[in-house]
């Protein structure tokens, strides 16, 4: 391969990681000679490497240091002769120097005098090629330029060498200037393309695998349960005198407790004392429980040492705050929840923002962050309706595939409204463009993936939606939304006043549960909540990106303040049978925006502790009525059939809004103990029989003996979109994530109930063909 392209922030990161840099330098000859990387992507930990189809450009990046706009500034290194990095034996020294040159020049900074920098005619620059004895006798040359990589103008730098400096060398560097544009554009294309490629076999790159693989994956004893452990929310099964949900911290951490080997190792490793950690695992793998035990461990250690400690546990909404508070009480944390020297605060980010900003009495949309965000999205949709009805944009709407589809198709409209709500948060408010339409509409730099995909006329429509929303919420209702609070808090936490006070007011450790539910603006806040007195950010993040049903893209966590993040994986699921888990993973593996450049694939090694032979377990099934009948009554018959088989707790998850009304009416009119779930994280009494009706966005964090998923019919979920492939893809990705969330709520049984005469949607039809899902027609008498 002729060129190696590295993103600016990845170059910065490698300069601070000598062992990782050395491993890459040693692997460069093999990487550049591996033809398979033209069709696959090498993914080891956060490292991503792949090549263009013509095998000329090799791109390398750290997924934690990639922005959410789809375009990056690139440093480019020539690999092959003449004047290639791989021409010499002292590759490591030259690799470090070229990374340094790319990092400095992409930022517009001058090189230090010790590199003996010379500028030449035509924009060619040279400097000493490294620090070793061989490198000092040679020089590298570089050229730089602003290049167009799609809709954005970015800086790019290209290095060649090393060799002895001579006129022919400088002329060769000048001739590489056109390659800046071609290689940078190709490298940006690989960022998106990598998500669609299969993964390369990592055993071919032993040194890289040993250096970049997360610590948890290197352990032979990483998994294998010591004993069965239900998920945190599970109540009712007993082991001895106490229910699982009533075990104390001391009982969980005892040598004979039910923690898995991986959970115990992470709990006792002390990794959080050295670097921030990201805890990744499938739904039901015990992330929340482990996070709470980690928080208790920090506090009990401080208690033993008679040292002060302040710990913050952040949850997404008020319902989850109440659940976690009660669970900490059961763990024995009451003395910390009410303590002063050793203090445990359980808060939503919304609560923290209002307290810190001193606006407890200032009107906000709702005291609960979840309700506030729901209102925001609904209000944006109303603003979108108003703008689409305005004749001002009639011509632009007709010419726009996005907005013409939204105006004509009610199934697509909510999706576009959600995308614009995210655009308002990240691109308009996040970049401080609330009063600057011109900069938003005409910006040559991508502000988000959506922004880069829209024409100026379409951006003008988006800004009109924002202004209408702003008038309704901020000016007429005179309330703050969640983004207003987040941006205001960011300003406060980046001020000299906070920098002076954070040693006293900041937290020694911060734990963030369900991090995937926080947007990019909110994620930037978490590193700033700490005392700032440690070399690293003492923050632990629990994440399952597949449960972010809106599938919005966020910048890599390294760019948001979590430098040198360590991954830990939980690969044992304590909730679902193997058959249910296999179906859920089959569905979520069909996504194109997960398990690629942004998120590790935890599905391959995940196992479950609940056997398919459990007395209540059956294979997942899609059922349809044999004759036409009211759909709600058909769902009610499925519930009664499950209850006759001693299935006590049943969740009904509605994926299609058209199915909600009739189903809710019939269930509420029945004699069953029905509850409608409206927000994520509400506490349910698992000791009592129940039927719970919910939409996918509200059912996260719950678990049931059986789940009935409704509305997953061909042409309904995802809805058909004619002539707009981009919207079709987004709708499909959202539907896949929502299916994953609802399926993984089930312990023993999963029933997909479809209407009479319907067919399963394409991914479920594939699952039937693969034998992962049974299909049955059910008679009225069932």
Image (tube, rainbow, N blue to C red):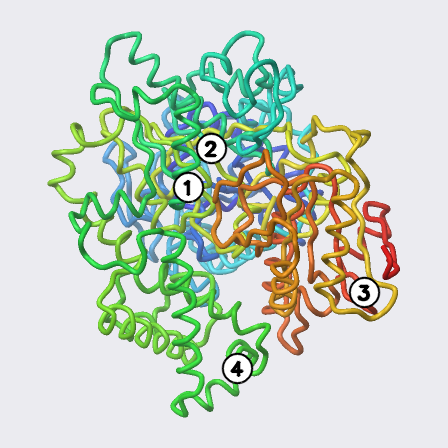
Q: Is residue 187 visible?
A: no
Distance from disc 4 to disc 3, alpha carbons, whole Å, reads: 27 Å
Mark 1 Cα-neighbour bin, 10 Å: few <14, some 14–19, many ≥20: many
Rendering coords of residue 686 (x, y %): 58, 36
- Give yes or no for contact between labels 1 and 2 (Cβ–Cβ under 8 Å): yes
Q: Nearer the viewer, residue 80 or 110?
A: 110
Rendering coords of residue 430 (x, y %): 31, 58
Of helix, strand and loop, which one carries label 4? helix
Mark 3 Cα-neighbour bin, 10 Å: few <14, some 14–19, many ≥20: some
Instruction: Identify the image quadrant of residue 282.
Output: top right
Q: Which residue is mark 1?
A: 557
Of helix, strand and loop, which one carries label 2? strand
Of helix, strand and loop, which one carries label 1? helix
Mark 4 Cα-neighbour bin, 10 Å: few <14, some 14–19, many ≥20: some
Distance from disc 2 to disc 4, alpha carbons, whole Å, reads: 41 Å
Rendering coords of residue 182 (x, y %): 52, 59
Of labels 3 and 1, earlier in sequence is 1
Distance from disc 2 to disc 3, alpha carbons, whole Å, reads: 40 Å
Distance from disc 4 to disc 1, alpha carbons, whole Å, reads: 36 Å
Image quarter where the N terminus lies is top right
Q: Which residue is mark 3?
A: 759
Instruction: Identify the image quadrant of residue 314.
Output: top left
Q: Which mark is residue 278?
A: 2
Distance from disc 3 to disc 1, alpha carbons, whole Å, reads: 41 Å
Foreground mark, 4 or 1, reads 4
Q: Which residue is mark 4?
A: 407
Above or below: residue 628 compared with residue 144: below
Foreground mark, 3 or 1, reads 3
């Amino acid at each position: 391969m002729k060129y190696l392209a590295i993103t600016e922030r990845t170059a910065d990161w490698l300069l601070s990681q000598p062992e990782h840099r050395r491993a890459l330098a040693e692997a460069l000859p093999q990487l550049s000679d591996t033809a398979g990387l033209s069709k696959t992507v090498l993914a080891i930990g956060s490292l991503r490497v792949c090549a263009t189809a013509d095998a000329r450009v090799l791109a390398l990046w750290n997924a934690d240091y990639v922005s959410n706009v789809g375009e990056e500034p690139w440093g480019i290194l020539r690999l092959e002769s003449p004047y290639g990095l791989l021409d010499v034996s002292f590759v490591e020294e030259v690799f470090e120097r070229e990374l340094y040159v790319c990092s400095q020049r992409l930022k517009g900074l001058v090189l230090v005098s010790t590199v003996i920098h010379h500028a030449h005619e035509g924009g060619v620059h040279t400097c000493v090629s490294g620090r070793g004895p061989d490198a000092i006798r040679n020089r590298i040359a570089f050229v730089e330029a602003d290049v167009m990589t799609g809709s954005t103008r970015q800086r790019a730098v290209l290095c060649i060498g090393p060799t002895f400096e001579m006129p022919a060398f400088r002329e060769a560097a000048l001739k590489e200037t056109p390659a800046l544009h071609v290689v940078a554009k190709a490298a940006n294309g690989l960022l998106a393309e990598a998500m669609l490629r299969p993964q390369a076999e990592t055993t071919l790159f032993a040194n890289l695998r040993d250096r970049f693989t997360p610590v948890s994956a290197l352990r032979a004893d990483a998994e294998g349960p010591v004993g069965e452990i239900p998920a945190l929310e599970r109540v009712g099964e007993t082991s001895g005198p106490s229910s699982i949900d009533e075990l104390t911290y001391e009982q969980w951490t005892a040598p004979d407790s039910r923690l898995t080997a991986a959970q115990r190792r992470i709990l006792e490793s002390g990794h959080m004392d050295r670097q921030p950690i990201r805890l990744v695992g499938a739904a039901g793998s015990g992330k929340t429980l482990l996070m709470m035990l980690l928080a208790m461990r920090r506090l009990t250690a401080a208690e033993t040492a008679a040292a002060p400690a302040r710990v913050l546990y952040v949850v997404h909404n008020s319902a989850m705050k109440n659940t976690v508070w009660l669970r900490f009480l059961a763990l024995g944390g009451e003395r910390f929840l009410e303590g002063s020297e050793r203090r445990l605060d359980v808060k939503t980010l919304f609560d923290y923002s209002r307290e810190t900003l001193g606006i407890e009495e200032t009107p906000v949309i709702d005291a609960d962050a979840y309700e506030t965000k729901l209102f925001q999205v609904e209000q944006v949709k109303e603003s979108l309706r108003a703008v689409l009805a305005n004749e001002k944009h009639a011509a632009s709407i007709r010419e726009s595939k996005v907005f013409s589809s939204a105006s004509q198709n009610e199934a697509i409209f909510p999706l576009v409204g959600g995308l614009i709500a995210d655009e308002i948060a990240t691109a308009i408010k996040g970049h401080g463009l609330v009063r600057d339409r011109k900069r938003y509409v005409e910006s040559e730099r991508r502000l988000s993936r959506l922004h880069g995909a829209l024409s100026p006329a379409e951006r003008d429509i988006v800004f009109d939606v924002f202004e209408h929303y702003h008038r309704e919420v901020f000016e007429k209702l005179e309330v703050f939304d969640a983004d207003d609070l987040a941006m205001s808090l960011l300003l406060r936490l980046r001020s000299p006043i906070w920098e002076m006070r954070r040693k006293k007011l900041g937290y020694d450790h911060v734990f963030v549960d369900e991090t995937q539910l926080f947007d990019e603006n909110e994620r930037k806040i978490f590193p700033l909540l700490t005392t700032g007195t440690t070399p690293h950010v003492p923050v632990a993040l629990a994440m399952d990106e597949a449960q972010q049903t809106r599938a919005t893209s966020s910048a890599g966590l390294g760019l948001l303040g979590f430098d040198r993040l360590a991954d830990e994986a939980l690969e044992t699921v304590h909730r679902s049978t193997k058959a249910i888990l296999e179906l859920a993973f089959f569905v979520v593996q069909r996504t194109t925006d997960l398990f690629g450049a942004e998120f590790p694939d935890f599905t391959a090694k995940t196992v479950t502790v609940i056997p398919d032979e459990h007395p209540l377990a059956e294979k997942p099934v899609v059922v349809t009525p044999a004759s036409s009948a009211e759909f709600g009554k058909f769902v009610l018959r499925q519930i009664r059939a499950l209850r006759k088989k001693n299935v006590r707790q049943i969740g009904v998850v509605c994926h299609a809004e058209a199915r909600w009304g009739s189903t809710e009416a019939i269930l509420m009119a029945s004699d069953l103990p029905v509850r409608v779930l409206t927000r994520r994280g509400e506490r349910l009494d698992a000791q009592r029989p129940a039927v719970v009706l919910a939409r996918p966005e509200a059912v996260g964090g719950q678990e049931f003996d059986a789940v009935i998923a409704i509305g997953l019919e061909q042409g309904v979920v995802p809805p058909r979109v004619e002539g707009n492939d981009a919207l079709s893809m987004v709708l499909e990705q959202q539907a896949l994530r929502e299916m994953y969330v609802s399926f993984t709520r089930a312990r023993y049984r999963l029933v997909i109930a479809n209407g009479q005469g319907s067919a399963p949607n394409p991914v479920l039809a594939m699952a039937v063909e693969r034998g992962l899902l049974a299909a049955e027609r059910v008679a009225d008498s069932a």
